[in-house]
Amino acid sequence: MSDKARILFDALDLDHDGTLTRTEVIIALNAKGPTLVAQGAIPAWGLGGPDDSSALFDEADANGDRVLSFEEFATLVDRRFGW
């Protein structure tokens, strides 16, 4: 798992509980997205609107439990962003 995936996961984990909810992903990417792009934590083409964030969540939620572990999240973003 990449260091970039960890940085991005931690930035999106708004309540710092070690998991991501759909709401956290949507809110955090909307609020922090431009800053994360500027920091190099996410490619500019990786940002989108709420529907894109929701789709990313659905794709990453491999076990269907409606929360993302770091491992689920990192597997997707490492592949999608080529990390």
Image (spheres, rainbow, N blue to C red):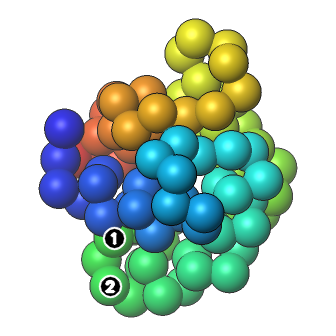
Front residue of this view, candidates 77 and 22: 22
Indicate left or right for 23 with 56 as reference. Answer: right
Q: Give SS at disc 2.
A: loop
Q: Quadrant of residue 48?
A: bottom right
Q: Quadrant of residue 8?
A: bottom left
Residue drawn at (31%, 64%) of the image? 7
Disc 1 target residue: 41
Indicate left or right for 80 with 2 as reference. Answer: right
Disc 2 target residue: 39
| Residue type highlighted by circle 1 | Ala
Kindly indicate whether the residue at mark 1 contacts the one at mark 2 (C-beta within 8 angstroms): yes
Front residue of this view, candidates 83 and 12: 12
Q: Is residue 43 above or below residue 61?
A: below
Q: Is residue 12 above or below residue 52?
A: below
Residue 59 visible in this rendered orientation of the protein: no
**Residue 34, image x, y percentages:** 54, 85
**Residue 47, image x, y percentages:** 59, 65
**Residue 27, image x, y percentages:** 74, 67
User: Which dot marks residue 56?
Assistant: none
Residue drawn at (29%, 54%) of the image? 6
Q: CA distance from mark 2 to mark 1?
A: 5 Å
Residue drawn at (30%, 52%) of the image? 5
